[in-house]
Amino acid sequence: MKFVDEATVRVRAGDGGAGCLSFRREKFIERGGPDGGDGGDGGHVYLVADNSINTLVDFRVTRKYRAESGRGGAGRNKTGRSGGDLEIKVPRGTVVHDVDTGELIGDLTTVGQRLKVVEGGRGGLGNTRFKSSTNRAPRKTTPGTSGEERNLQLELKLLADVGLVGMPNAGKSTLIRSMSAAKPKVADYPFTTLHPNLGVVSVGPLQSFVMADVPGLIEGAAEGAGLGIQFLKHLQRTRLLLHLVDIAPLNVDEDPAKAFRAIEGELQNFSADLTDKPRWLVVNKTDLLAADDLAVAKEMLLGELDWDGPVFLVSAETGDGTVALGQAVIRELELLKAEQTDKPD
């Protein structure tokens, strides 16, 4: 199925039912008075986060949604039936904006979370409501109000603990295949990954984390070049970024340090939130170099980058170093979670 992470829909709440104009008419009862009931309220429209949905592809087919309108009132002071609410299931991680105003309406991050996006109209008043000591036979009613209507922009941001960034062919898809049960497409040409992939990495009993692989970035991505910029928003929810660098590129002109700085620049141009996240350097494809050559290449890379953060040497192809990386990641996530818990609201 094609991955779809954005969609525009139009939603409309139900209209309120009209109030009733009616007078009591029964045998042997003169001047029974008004008995027109109120109209029912229109139904609301809710978005509900659901784990059974992974993409927004259904909203490319069905673009208009409307809740049920309320029924009109009736004689004998009968209130019209209210319209049923409409619940629209969306993937967990959906962000909702108003297309016309740009307003952020809500962010559905937990399963079962409900977000009211438009409110139903109120039912009209029947003529009984207007009865008074000076107006014994009112002939006034009010119509129901119209339900709200909105154009919504739905944007899916994947919920992952760890995000992978790097140039095309840095080995991100291979790494997520090696560390999890996810099976993204892997090939020896650029832009193999066309949409984000999620994988659950199990480190031990009751210890696991979710890793996200997004399409590779290239220079100029922040201006729209390549594919990865379309999906960088998925990394904004992650708590840790793993920056993969190909230590043994096939093209000798592709300098690992230059590739690292290019990606770093694109992250900064896209959002300061990404550069503020904890980021580790993961040197990949170590199996392509002899031990001595690898040590020299590592020292040259770190020297050029002036990098003082965590560094991991892995081979996504053979799995070397991936276990240690996974264990370090789970420890870091637990520390970050503890720090977040200790912070006051």
Image (tube, helix red, strand yellow):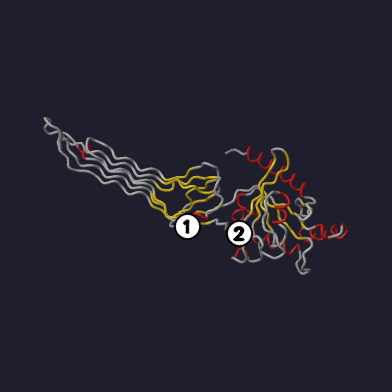
Q: Residue at x 74, y 46 (%)?
A: 326
Task: Provide residue 301's location: percent of width, then percent of height.
Answer: 79, 60
Amino acid on which disc 2 is placed: Phe
Provide the secondary structure element on which disc 1 rests.
loop
**In the rendered image, which residue does mark 1 sit on?**
61
Tell me: residue 331, above or below residue 294: above
> Where in the figure is residue 279, as x and y percent of width and height?
70, 52
Residue carrying label 2? 270
Question: Which residue is found at the position 40% from the left and 45% from the top?
Answer: 44
In this rendered view, identify the residue nearer to me: 204 or 341: 204
In the image, taking residue 89 as reference, residue 71 lies left or right, namely left
Label count reads 2
Residue at the image position 70 percent from the left and 49 percent from the top: 180
Nearest to the eye among marks 2 and 1: give it.
Answer: 1
Q: Nearer the viewer, residue 108 or 221?
A: 108
Q: Residue furthest right?
A: 292
Q: Nearer the viewer, residue 240 or 289?
A: 289
In the picture shown, does residue 117 fall above or below 253? above
